[in-house]
Image (cartoon, rainbow, N blue to C red):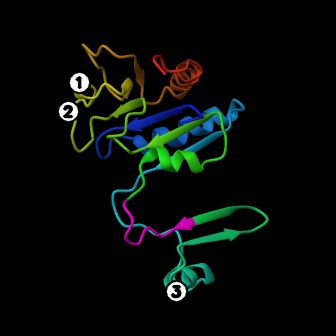
Amino acid sequence: MNQPVLGVTGWKNSGKTTLVERLVAELVRRGRRVSTVKHAHHDFDIDVPGTDSFRHRQAGAGEVAIVSSRRWALMHELREEAEPPLASVLARLAPCDLVVVEGYKREPHPKIEARRREARDTTPLSAHDPTIVAVAADHAQPGEALPVFGLDDIAAIADFAETFCATPPQGG
């Protein structure tokens, strides 16, 4: 991984997507170039049936690039291939100051754990996951050994992300 990576993990309905959205907006406001990777646990499609690019994929194209004067996207059909590991996805991204990853819970990159009272499960993940480096929660976290931030304290979480990612990992 050439650029720093920081993940956001947590149980369903723990506030992961909102935290990522707000953290990215704050870091961009501070002048950082940020990319994101979102892991989906279900079938998804970013293309609309009937469009030319959809028809290209349906015809069997392995990759379809859609390009305009405002944006471009590359869709890669896995067909019989295995889902790529996070490192393969990160290698395809353009250089940036930080990649924020949502999902990929079992990958070894550092992560912030989001915790909300209304989450599907409230069992702390950090006790059994050494890749979790901080917690962002909407309620008190007595006894938590990691740095704890309010789930809405985006400025403090962004400060942590900038500081944490400025220090290269130890041991190579």
What kind of element bears circle 1? helix
Q: Which residue is drawn at 75% across and 68% down?
A: 68
Name the amino acid type tagged 2. Thr
Q: Residue at x 42, y 29 (%)?
A: 110
| First along the sequence among labels 2 and 3 | 3
Of circles 1 and 3, the one toward us is 3
| Label 3 packing within 10 angstroms: few (<14), some (14-19), many (20+) | few
Eye-nearest disc, 2 or 3: 3
The image quadrant that residue 105 belongs to is: top left
**In the rendering, at what x and y percent does residue 2 appear?**
59, 34
**Which residue is at 22% across, 27% downward?**
128
Q: What residue type is labelled 3?
A: Ala
Is 116 rendered above or below residue 148? below
| Neighbour tally class for label 1: few under 14, some 14-19, many 20 plus, Cα within 10 Å | few
- Dot 2 corresponds to which residue? 123
Residue designated by label 3: 59
Percent x, y of residue 81:
39, 65
Q: Give the range drawn in magenta.
A: 75-82
Is 143 on the left-hand or right-hand side of 112? Answer: left
Magenta span contains residue 53 = no
Front residue of 9 and 74: 74
Q: Main secondary structure of the magenta part?
A: loop
| Residue named by callout 1 | 127
Give me the C-alpha separation between circle 1 and circle 2: 9 Å
